[in-house]
Image: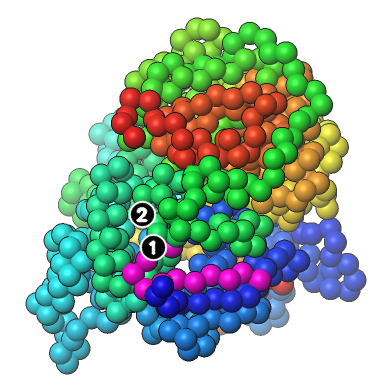
Amino acid sequence: MPTAFLQLSGVTKSFGKTRALSDVDFDLLAGEVHALVGENGAGKSTLLGILSGVISPDQGRIEIEGDPVVIDGTARAQALGIGTVFQELSLAGSLSVAENIFAGRLPTVMGFVRWSQLRHSASDILSEFDIRIDVERPVDSLPLGTRQLVEIGKALSLNSRILLLDEPTSALTVDEVDALFRVLRRLRMRGIGIVYVSHKMAEVFRIADRITVLRDGRRVSTRPVGETSPASVVRDMVGRHLTALTDAKNVPGQPALAARRLSRRGEFTGVDLAIRFGEVVALAGILGAYRTQLMCTLAGILRPHAGTIELCGEPVRFRDLRDAMRRGIAYVPDDRRTEGLFLTRSVTENAVVTTLRRFTHMGLVDAGASRAAARQMVDRFHIKTPGLGAPAGKLSGGNQQKLMLSKWLQIDPAILLVNEPTKGVDVEAKTEIHQQIRQLAAAGKAVLVLSSDLPELLAVSDRIVVMREGHVVAALESCVATEEEVLRIASGAERPIPGEAA
Amino acid sequence: MSLGRSEPLADARGPGRLVRLVLGTRELTLAILVLAIIAGMSLASPFFLSLANFRAIVIGMAPTAIIAIGMTVLLASGGFDLSVGSVLALSSTIAAFLLIMGVPITLAVAAALVLGAVIGLVNGIVVTKIGVNPLVATLGSMLIVRGIALVLTEGFSLSNLPPEFGWAGRAEVIGIPFVLWVTVLLVLVFDLAMRNGTFFRKIYYIGSNEKAARLSGLAVDRVRILAYMLSGTLAAFAGVLLASRLMSGTPTAGNALELQVLAAAVIGGASLRGGEGTILGAFLGVIFVALINNAMTMLAVSIYWQMIVTGAVLVLAVALDMLVLRRQE
């Protein structure tokens, strides 16, 4: 048994009242890939943040090769030999691969860059790990998977002994994943320890030596890959077997919106999906399932490359979002701050933006009528606001979310596509939004809900459609489905994608 | 409906409330400053408070004020237009050119206005449909349009216009220059339109969050193109009025006017971030700058100092805005 290279014991971290990590132990051996898995909010990012020096723990001890260390800041992490590749790549796109690898440390003579030395050093580092990239090319011109390798090369150029990878394959193609894994295996042979954070069960079991599961900020298990199975890892991640049931599930009616073999190149392929009036369908999946792209296509924002969309049984082709809106489809975006609301404009203005025409007489906005409509929405959704004239940015997250939803209900849509309805809102607002969604279905609307919150999906929907890597891989009845089952399917722990050899 | 800027908060209380209301509402701040300058100057210079001086100020600032309307609309939408000075020059030369050729006045004026609208249309299409940055797109059209005016006239002014054409530039109605009537009318109409007009409300939505506006089903590109067309048309109209006053088409007129207009609009509360600004504010900004310049002329301060003061006022106005904003947050 080799000794632990990196050892964390009793690490605890709170943000305000939320305890992100409690008393977590974690160790990494030299030359192993140690996967770190867990649902959203399980504490993976916090742990990674602590190791990379971005977050400082409240309690706990960190040792590297037996010596206690304090990782205060990213520079310190680098000095200790810890390299991090975050999900958001931090490369300068218009600069060359070599310049990126040696960003901030360019070899110079009297203030001038020594280009030939830069090229050689960069190629040396990359070829040492068998990464084949032309170091003079601008990073922008490389495919995403290759950029990931550049980022890894950059981390290695700092003589890293420990490499932290956060969801490294979320945007990669199958071939790119293979290339990445080849590099990771080579790094492992060189004795570099790798912490690998991922949602994707299939990949974790391909590359990892050990798997640690976090849940609600605690370590649930750490097991060698040979002694566990995807199913038991998922069970550890979910932890509970309860299936949330809502009281009133409806009897669905006529077909409202359907996708038939719908495809977009490089995103989703051959998607079949049908929503009927009076039901809530949930779209489940993990990062890289292309659920948002599918939803945007159904809303007329993106165009399909193949397949058809059917509205009330008739094939339609949306010219754009406005066209889809006119036909009674509302798309509620997931990011209320950048896509949903006008934060500097008043609550009233936000409430009526989708229906300006209704409040217009002879080219002028009827201020009284629009305020009355806004007042109605504020009352119906219990939106807490200092006043109808207050800028939307002054509202809390939950109230902003309700305002965004109400803005879309103004057009009285027959079909509602909701992307992450409760991202970052408090429990109370969450419950209210769930009730509103159920009421809309009860009133005969067709609702499609995309969410990364599994309990939410189970609670609010009648049916769950699971997507993985651009394919619909399963459709389940919400009343019998479990979180565990959905997660297992979504993460690829079982059921290969149709038409592809697993 | 609401003002272009976010409304002063209702929770502001106590003695600081009045100060905050005044500092938080740019129109009020400027109105008070304008009155202060007028009062101060009346005491400082016996010539300031004369009809002749006021006429000079008003006639001089009219083109700037008219162009500032279009510029403020564009700023509120998150864009801006550097070609306005050039459009003013080309419109005045084209109108003069057609008049000299014997084209009737109404037709010549209409042609100049259509030309302004077309330049705006091109600006708008290049910015929205092709996606060229507004700075680059309108910098390009600024050079091109100015170039066309100079090529057409080989750099000379076109004079010998029919005497009737000079009416608009010289006439007075009830003792007040016709130009001022027109300017004030335009300012009032567009100020009300920006506050209550559905089309202009869309401008604020787009300027405050273009992505959300698009996802809310607003025809973002169409609105932005129309805003550029409005700016071009108003600049052309200012050019026609200028030609009428000078009785000539001047290809070099309105040099650096776009920057003066931008400065006045920003002093008046508009922002390059988009989503804010009112026509009344911009108009007061124009008056404010015109008064400061006039005051310095009256006090025999060198004309070069006027640039320094205008620049300082511009930065001060925006800095003050930032400070008020920060205190609110």
Where the C terminus of chain B falls, by quadrant? bottom right
* Label 1: which secondary element: strand
Residue that appears at 30% across and 78% down: A158
Q: Quadrant of residue B285?
A: bottom right
Asked if A98 appears above or below B188 in the picture, the reply is below
* Residue A486 place in picture, x, y as percent: 57, 35
Asked if A438 appears above or below B223 in the picture, the reply is above
Most common secondary structure along the magenta stretch: strand
Q: Is A65 on the left or on the right of A26, as rendered?
A: left
The answer to whether the residues at label 2 and label 1 have Cβ atoms under 8 Å apart is yes
Per the model, the C-alpha gap separating discs 2 and 1 is: 7 Å
* Residue A458 place in picture, x, y as percent: 67, 33
- Residue A30 shown in magenta: yes
Q: Please name the amino acid that badge 2 sits on.
A: Ile
* Residue B71 place in picture, x, y as percent: 49, 51
Front-lying residue, B292 or B178: B292
- Residue B145 shown in magenta: no
Q: Quadrant of residue B42?
A: bottom right
- Does residue A168 appear in the picture of this structure? yes
Asked if A217 appears above or below A467 in the picture, the reply is below
Q: Which mark is residue A152?
A: none
* Label 2: which secondary element: helix
Front-lying residue, B5 or A72: A72
Front-lying residue, A384 or A398: A398
Q: Residues within 10 Å of mark 1 (few under 14, many from 20)?
A: many
* Residue A366 place in picture, x, y as percent: 75, 32
Chain part drawn in magenta: A23-35
Q: Which residue is mark 1?
A: A33
Q: Please name the amino acid that badge 1 sits on.
A: Val
Q: Which residue is mark 2?
A: A207
